[in-house]
Image (cartoon, rainbow, N blue to C red):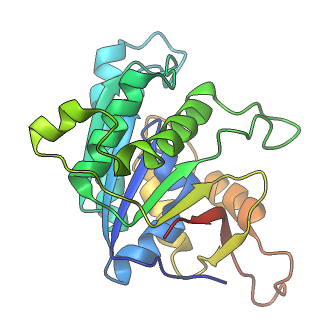
Amino acid sequence: MTSTPSSPCVLVVLAHPDDPEFFCGGTLALWAQQGSRISYCLLTRGDKGDDNGSDPAGLAAIREGEQRAAAQVLGVNEVAFLNYPDGYLVPDLDLRREVVRAIRRVRPSVVVTCDPTNFFPNDRYINHPDHRAAGQVTLDAVFPAAGSRMFFPELLAEGLEPHKVSQVYVAMPQTPNTVIDVTESFERKVEALCQHASQIGDADALRIRLKDRMLDPSSSPELPRYVERFRRIDLA
């Protein structure tokens, strides 16, 4: 099982507040503890995160605060929002430019995103279209755009030189090839998720669901092991 990234600089690009904690919070907590500098780039502020008639702007402000609190629990260094409308993400050239801008600004060796091909994570869930759009636009930004002067030359005028990412970790993958043991950081993942109070009702029920979902079937009942799975792509 893998435990550390190849570099101390990690950029996480996902769609909504709470996506990083759900998709890879245990891994991020481990990497932060081991000295990685971790930045979040959230494409939306989660303004459609409930069906109770909430004011979208007010809900977005709440969720931004929750996300910053959750990131602090995990040891994340920076949280940025691109402020696109929740639910309407499209992996077009404008959004790709914004993600390229984030990559060239942060200059990570490792980018974490999600799987754009995963429409049906299980038999009871259709993957949110924003998740799939976030994964596609991030992969398209990583290669070839972020590393080439020929793409988005207007970013050069901002002082943002091309940058080549060494590794991509794709969370919630259809076909994982990397398993990370997050038993040590499992409770920090739960604590971080509990900061998203507008989304999480019963913390004990959440803990039970996560233990069931993340249990490594090869571990023993006496010493359960919890894991997060990724598709790792080595570009260097």
- Residue 65 makes an appearance in the image: no
Percent coordinates x, y for residue 49 in the rendering: 49, 25
Percent coordinates x, y for residue 147 in the rendering: 36, 52
Residue at the image position 72 percent from the left and 39 percent from the top: 117
- In the image shown, does 134 or 120 lie closer to the viewer? 134
Residue at the image position 76 percent from the left and 70 percent from the top: 215
* Quadrant of res 10: bottom left
Percent coordinates x, y for residue 22 in the rendering: 56, 52
- In the image shown, does 220 or 178 lie closer to the viewer? 178
Residue at the image position 65 percent from the left and 39 percent from the top: 116
Percent coordinates x, y for residue 56 in the rendering: 36, 15
Residue found at the very far front of the displayed protein: 150
Q: Is residue 171 left or right of residue 68?
A: right
Q: Is residue 16 left or right of residue 61?
A: right
Name the quadrant of the N terminus: bottom right
In this rendering, is residue 91 above or below 25?
A: above
In this rendering, is residue 163 above or below 13?
A: below
* Quadrant of res 127: top right
- In the image shown, does 63 or 19 lie closer to the viewer? 19
Residue found at the very far right of the displayed protein: 123
- Residue 23 makes an appearance in the image: yes
Residue at the image position 46 percent from the left and 9 percent from the top: 53
**Count of number-bearing discs:** 0
Q: Is residue 111 left or right of residue 218?
A: left
